[in-house]
């Protein structure tokens, strides 16, 4: 059974620092891995999607890497801003199909 | 706007009542899902439908009955609501059962409170 873990559970940094969010998964048989952002009381916004054949994806200040063999992904957010404060969720689309399995999320606070 | 839209956004109801949550996607996706986010914010799959066919029923009580009239709609009906059903319910959709290049798209959620 696939298990997804995100460490740390919470992170507080001063504005301008780079953020590093970690995600690990137990079963490397995945189609893709997706990072989401969730603001309090809101839905999920997709940030980056990495296919299993890819090593990384970039969008603006965000960069996500994937090491499928070791079951790890890292989300980097450069030069953090207070507006980056949110919960970041990692999820894997299993090769067995038809669902995303989520980690517990990392709650990020960027202090001005 | 292309999106996954679900209604209502908030639902407060008494124990024992029956309620429905509606979901529609206009992305042309072939697979739709219901996820539940509990009080600890953990998201877990409940149901998955591909082209109106049930694919996943993840040990959800049979008080929960999804219905997919067509591949653009997936509604969730809940009978005899219990306090423990209080949660945020998210609808999502994807192409090719989640293997497509755009991944999953989520709705904004329905916050259900059972009193």
Image (tube, coloured by chain):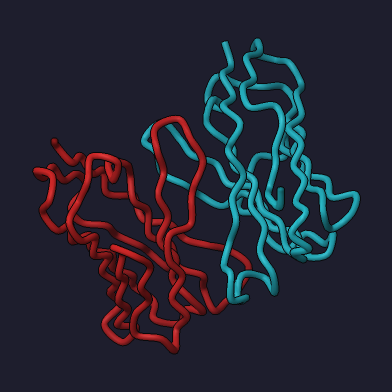
Q: Is residue B53 above or below residue A95?
A: above
Percent x, y of residue B81: 67, 22
Q: Quadrant of the C terminus of chain B?
A: top right
Give the camera-side residue of A88 and A79: A79
> Which residue lies at the image location 35% right of the left edge and 73% below the top edge?
A58
Residue B36 appears anywhere in the view: yes
Which image quadrant is residue B48 in? bottom right
Chain ID, cyan in image: B
Q: Position of residue B19 (x, y in %)?
A: 75, 24
Asked whether residue A1 is in view, the answer is no
- The shade of chain A is red
- Give the vertical position of A109 relative to B102 (above or below): above
Residue at left 31%, top 71%? A64
Left or right of residue A20, residue B98 in this image: right
Q: Is residue B39 left or right of residue A14?
A: right
In the rendered view, tell whether residue B115 sits above or below residue B29: above
Residue B46: give x, y in percent of width and height: 61, 49
* Residue B90 placement: quadrant: top right
> Which residue, as the protein is rendered here, is positioned at the far right?
B69
> x, y percentage for residue B42?
41, 44
Judge by depth and name the residue closer to the eye, A89 or B19.
Answer: A89
Determine whether B108 is above or below B70 in the image.
above
- At x 40% / y 61%, what residue is drawn? A35
Count the marks: how many? 0
Residue occupying image coordinates x 74% and y 38%: B76
């Amino acid at each position: 059974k696939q298990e997804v873990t995100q460490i740390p559970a919470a992170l507080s940094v001063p504005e301008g620092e780079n953020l590093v969010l970690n995600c690990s998964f137990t079963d490397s048989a995945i189609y893709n891995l997706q990072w989401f952002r969730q603001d309090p009381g809101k839905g999920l916004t997709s940030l980056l999607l990495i296919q299993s054949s890819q090593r990384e994806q970039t969008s603006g200040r965000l960069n996500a890497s994937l090491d499928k063999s070791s079951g790890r992904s890292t989300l980097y957010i450069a030069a953090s801003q207070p507006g980056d404060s949110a919960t970041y969720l990692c999820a894997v689309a299993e090769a067995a199909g038809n669902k995303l399995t989520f980690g517990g999320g990392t709650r990020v606070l960027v202090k001005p | 706007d292309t999106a996954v839209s679900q209604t209502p956004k908030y639902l407060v109801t008494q124990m024992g009542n029956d309620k429905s949550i509606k979901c529609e996607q206009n992305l042309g996706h072939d697979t739709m899902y219901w996820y539940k986010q509990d009080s600890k914010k953990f998201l877990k799959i409940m149901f998955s439908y591909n082209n109106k066919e049930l694919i996943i029923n993840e040990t959800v009580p049979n008080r929960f009955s999804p219905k997919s009239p067509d591949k653009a709609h997936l509604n969730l009906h809940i009978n005899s609501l219990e306090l423990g059903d209080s949660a945020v319910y998210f609808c999502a959709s994807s192409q090719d059962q989640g293997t497509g290049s755009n991944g999953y798209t989520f709705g904004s959620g329905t916050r259900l409170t059972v009193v």
